[in-house]
Image (cartoon, rainbow, N blue to C red):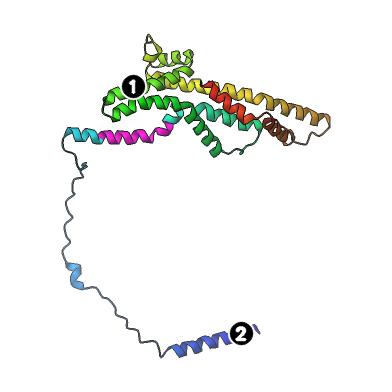
Amino acid sequence: MLQKIRTLVLISSYVGILLLMPAISPLQVHAQIPDASAAFEPIAAEPEPVPLTLSLEGIAGPKSMDSALKIVLLMTVLSLAPAFLVLLTSFTRIVIVLGFLRQAIGTNQAPNNQIIIGLALFLTIVVMSPVLHQMNEDALQPFLAEEMSQQEAFAKVQIPLKTFMLGQVREKDIGLFLELTETEAPDTPEELPMLVVIPSFVLSELKTAFQMGFILFIPFLIIDMVVASVLMSMGMMMLPPVLISLPFKILLFVMVDGWYLIVRSLMQAFQ
């Protein structure tokens, strides 16, 4: 049967070819032979290299060049904006505490990283809104109205931010970076350079965040220990204690309204 099918297919193919042959025009194949004389044509000399120059259009004089460099510098600063957000605001402490809270409860991906970062970002805006408002009123708006120079605006914009950071920093950390940068201690804290204030602020925020994270771990750790002790006393040593303690930790966190307490504590710590 299989041989008959193959024979039928083969015959059908031949018949189709024979029917299509009259409709196909004869193919004309032209062999393209290269001209022999072209092989003996002289080779053109290589063009001389053109010097590469870099120019900025629309620049007429040193003042215009200074404006162009300011634009390049502004774009560079904007590319570093995420680093400024992390190092100069309350974002570092908030996101670390929320991360510790997730680990203490035992929910590895709930809430996920996007939710934690988004919540930390909005809480940072709430904390930093008075500072941003003062920076806008004292430095940005007068500079845009051409009431002060760029150097004056830069000096003015540092004052509210430095005041905020000095309110959270420890004297020990300031002393450390004064020693590392070989800077003489000024008469007042407001005269400290930003090179000393910023790393001191970050170091202080890391220590405070880890202290708050340790406090968050204590009640959930007690629940894990109690559940593990109960399981061992019942002889259920093969059952993971985390599997039993996780619902109790979530229940405890919901009953005490944990999110409200955490956010309130974080906000009050910056006041």
Q: Is 238 or 76 nearer to us in this picture?
A: 76
Residue 101 image offset from top left, x and y in percent:
61, 30
Please report whichever mark, 2 or 1, sits nearer to the chain's N-terminal start.
2
Residue 158 image offset from top left, x and y in percent:
37, 22
Q: Amino acid at mark 2?
A: Ile
Relative side of 131 to 268, left or right: left
Residue at 32% in and 34% down: 74
Residue at 78% in and 27% down: 229
Under tag 2, what secondary structure? Answer: helix
Relative side of 119 to 164, left or right: right
Say which quarter of the image contains residue 3: bottom right
Numbered-mark total: 2
Q: Is residue 14 above or below residue 89?
A: below
Q: Amino acid at mark 1?
A: Lys
Say which quarter of the image contains residue 241: top right
Label 2 to label 1: alpha-carbon separation: 93 Å
User: Would you say residue 182 is visible in this rendering?
Assistant: no
Q: Nearer the viewer, mark 2 or mark 1?
A: 1
Under tag 1, what secondary structure? Answer: helix
Residue 190 image offset from top left, x and y in percent:
38, 15
Q: Quadrant of the N terminus?
A: bottom right
Q: Is residue 182 above or below residue 65?
A: above
Q: Is 158 or 186 nearer to us in this picture?
A: 158
Q: Is 1 or 98 nearer to us in this picture?
A: 98
Q: Is 46 or 256 nearer to us in this picture?
A: 256
Residue at 81% in and 34% down: 236
Say which quarter of the image contains residue 99: top right
Residue that label 1 marks: 156
Residue at 51% in and 85% down: 13
Please state the extent of the stretch shown in magenta in the rendering: 69-83
User: Is residue 167 part of the magenta span, yes or no?
Assistant: no
Residue that label 2 marks: 5
